[in-house]
Image (cartoon, rainbow, N blue to C red):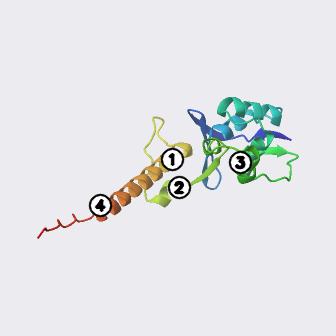
């Protein structure tokens, strides 16, 4: 089964992970962990699953197993980041893979993950319009990136505030001191 990356996406690399953004009627961002990024990088239509498995092993230390590659390819295909030639109908689950390979919890965290984030347009969030760039207009990618960053920051701030509030309201009154007769 040959896999090929789709065209027309913006890729941002951070350490060993990749953020892939594509525009359609709504902006989608896909976060690929280290194992999924290893497979995505090799999806040129010529690399075999066995070669991809070796690349995952080299990058993550996971076993060189083609079912790990299948898991990554399934996630990438579901996110429409790759096209599969002659896709296999066999479905592999994370649970079955963990049980078959006997992975530790640390190794389970390294299995391929493709997370999809829908980035709403800036107008839907009530945020201020994008600031002009040096050429005078903001591109859709810049607007989507700024919107995603604002959304993530706002969510993190709200979560931290709610946690701090719950913690503060749960403080206990000091225990009464016992009296001795």
Tell me how far mark 4 sits from mark 2, CA to CA: 36 Å
Comes first in the chain, label 1 or label 4: 1
Disc ID at residue 143: 1
Q: Name the residue located 73 percent from the left edge and 50 percent from the top edge.
A: 99
Cβ atoms under marks 1 and 4 closer than 8 Å: no
Circle on res. 94: none
* Sequence-first disc among 4 and 2: 2
Tally the numbered discs: 4
Bin the neighbour count of mark 1 within 10 Å (Cα to Cα): few under 14, some 14-19, many 20 and up.
some
Say if mark 2 contacts mark 1, CB within 8 Å: yes
Residue found at the very far bottom of the displayed protein: 181
> Residue lying furthest top in this view?
58
Judged left or right of residue 154, residue 181 is: left
Residue 35 or residue 42, whichever sits in front? 35
CA distance for labels 3 and 1: 40 Å
Identify whether 116 is placed above or below 63: below
Which of marks 1 and 3 precedes in the sequence?
Answer: 3
Placement of the N terminus among the 4 image quadrants: top right
- Specify whether residue 128 is in view: no
**Residue denoted by label 2:** 121
Q: Secondary structure at mark 3?
A: helix
Residue 174 % position (x, y): 21, 63
- The residue at 64%/43% (across/down) is 104
| Element type where label 4 sits in the image | helix
Relative side of 34 to 138, left or right: right
Q: How far is disc 2 from disc 1 in space, using C-alphas?
A: 8 Å
- Check disc 4 and report the residue beneath it: 168
Image coordinates for residue 97, horizontal then vertical, percent: 74, 48
């Amino acid at each position: 089964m040959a896999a090929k990356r789709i065209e027309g996406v913006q890729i941002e690399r951070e350490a060993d992970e990749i953020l892939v953004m594509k525009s359609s009627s709504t902006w989608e961002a896909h976060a690929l962990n280290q194992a999924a990024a290893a497979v995505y990088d090799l999806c040129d239509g010529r690399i075999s699953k066995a070669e991809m498995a070796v690349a995952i092993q080299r990058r993550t230390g996971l076993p060189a197993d083609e079912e790990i590659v299948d898991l990554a390819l399934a996630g990438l295909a579901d996110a429409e980041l790759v096209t599969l030639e002659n896709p296999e109908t066999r479905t592999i689950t994370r649970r079955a893979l963990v049980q078959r390979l006997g992975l530790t919890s640390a190794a389970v965290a390294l299995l391929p993950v493709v997370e999809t984030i829908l980035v709403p347009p800036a107008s839907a969030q009530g945020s201020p319009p994008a600031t002009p760039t040096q050429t005078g207009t903001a591109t859709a990618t810049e607007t989507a990136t700024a919107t995603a960053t604002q959304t993530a920051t706002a969510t993190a701030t709200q979560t931290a505030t709610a946690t701090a509030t719950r913690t503060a309201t749960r403080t206990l009154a000091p225990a009464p001191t016992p009296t001795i007769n």
